Amino acid sequence: MTDALEIRNLHKSFGALAVARDIALALPKGARHALIGPNGAGKTTLVNLITGVLRPSAGQILLDGEDITVLPQAARTRRGVARTFQINQLFRGLTVLENVYLAVAERMRTSHRLWRPAGAEREVIDQALAQLEALRLADDALRLVRELPYGRQRLVEIAIALAQKPRVLLLDEPAAGVPSSESHLILDAVGALDPEIAILIIEHDMDVVFRFASRITVLVAGAVLTEGGPQEIRADERVRAVYLGQEFAHG
Amino acid sequence: MAAIDTPATAPADPHARARAYLARRHRFGVWETLPWLLALAAFFLFPDRMTFGSQVLLMVLFALSLDLILGFAGIVSLGHAAFFGLGAYAAALLTQRWGWEEPISGLVAAAAVAAVAGAASGWLLLRYRGLTLLVLTLATTIMLQELGNLLRDLTGGYDGLPGLTFTPLLGLFDYDLYGHVNYLYALAVLFVLFMAVRMIVYSPFGQTLAGIRENVARMHAVGSPVHLRLVTVYTIAAAIAGVAGALFTQTNAYVTLGVFDFDNSAGVMVMLILGGAGRLYGAFVGAVIYMVLQDVLSKASPQYWQFAVGLLLVLTVLFARRGLLGLIEDTARLFVRERKP
């Protein structure tokens, strides 16, 4: 079976600085794959390369076997790639409902309509509300995003991505900045996601990683250090060295 | 569908409330009749100021067109006078060069010319944002004005094209010395276009514009064709500004290259900031305040009237960042909150 997402020999450099070096990665349908690595390893850069924010210098990105390496961001989104952001990228001055409405309207291709009120698009509103319901956000539907506590805002961040009905979902530190008393709400939501979706999650909390992911890729200085199951990664001396902040000579 | 609709009592309550909010926000409020009633009342109260009145109305229309791109889509432009000017000259040349004197088709032609210019310049310029866009729009307008100056034979240069003639409105109403017909003409055009803009703002397309204004990066991430949306709204706004310019030509029966002045671009933005951007009726409030202040103060002090406008602008930006309408909204909200408990 073709993988939902496949990355082949991906390379990206800004001048002499290589931020992604020969990265290979494969996510089968329904994958739960974690991407870990120290700060500056190029994790978010990889997400930007996959979603089309950045154009790779070399290599290939395939979605269900189809080459999407040179497609613009909007075209990739339409083919089923969605992401959340490490730092909230929300429509802060709009209501929670409108935030999700925008994503649903893009997916259902109604966002170009000029001559009827947005409120008349019942199907879009129903789907947006169902999405909020699924993440227990419906009670806040009419509140402005900027008035929500940070933990709830992180849920909206996920709600928008899910409203795109992705086949491949890239979660960039979904619980970042959320107090630990609330972070379980977000991690529960992540844990309850549709098993059909292939998910790549960037996360620093190793407990979360080992619980959630069945495959783990360790990224160091823009290159894949190793890939394996939770047991292998846990036992790997090199990974331990990287995470203990020791000097590590790449071989 | 039925499964969603039936349990509409307790658990679905937030659903019903949320749907009602989106379904109702575009409905007309009673207060929305107020500006139109006032505009009609002005017709009867100040019958000898109708020439001035029609200038106020066309500036409301011009400010409304800027609100569509600045207030709703977040496009900052200091060259909006370009489209006003193109519309003004399209209407003028149509009658002066080609003898086409019918005014309403003149408006349509002006809208078309401005729309083409808006689509072309928007396609090129809307790749940029912020300060870069500000300077590029400004430069474009200055270049247009200089082009008009080079083509003096066609445009009349800074002396302009005086004494333009138009056939009676709808073939029935001839223009009177007091500008009564002009006033009602401008009011009718403003009303029609205002309703169109209002519809656009509350449409799914309008919702997309709000998304682009609030967070472009996220709009890209949800798959929105951001550039196409921006060019579309820029084109619509250009067409409306073109109509405002054509109204200027028709109600004054002359036009000069002054329509392209920086003062015109900056003035319309000041109006919008005074009234409150991104709220439709801010264009009304701001344009009326600006024009009346200009009228009253320039008589009292022809040299220094802009000082008062400047002072008012500073006060607005310091104490009422969302404009006069925003200030009224906030005050009203305070009252509601105090009366509730």
Image (cartoon, rainbow, N blue to C red):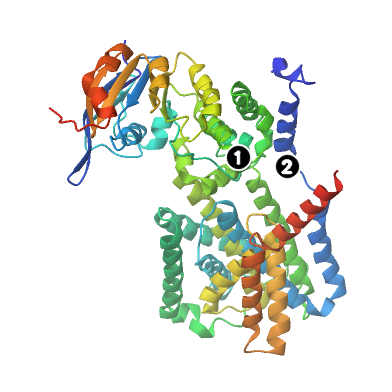
The chain ID associated with circle 1 is A
Q: Which mark is residue A91?
A: none
Three-letter residue code for mark 2: Arg
Identify the image quadrant of residue B120.
bottom left
Q: Is residue A175 above or below residue B215?
A: above
Question: At x 61% / y 77%, what residue is drawn?
Answer: B310
Element at label 2: loop
Q: Foreground residue, B25 or B79?
A: B25
Report whether B157 appears left or right of A125. left
Type of the residue with mark 1: Val
Task: Tell me, yes or no, if residue A108 can be seen here.
Answer: no
**Whole-percent x and y of residue B165?**
65, 77
Location of the C terminus of chain B (image quadrant): top right
The answer for which chain carries disc 2 is B
Q: Which residue is drawn at the image coordinates 46% and 29% (left, top)? A: A174
Q: What residue would you read off at disc 2?
A: B25
In this view, which residue lies farthest toward the left? Answer: A251
Q: Residue at x 56, y 73 (%)?
A: B264
Residue on which disc 1 sits: A145
Mark 1 element type = helix
User: Are the residues flagged by discs 2 and 1 from a single subunit?
Assistant: no
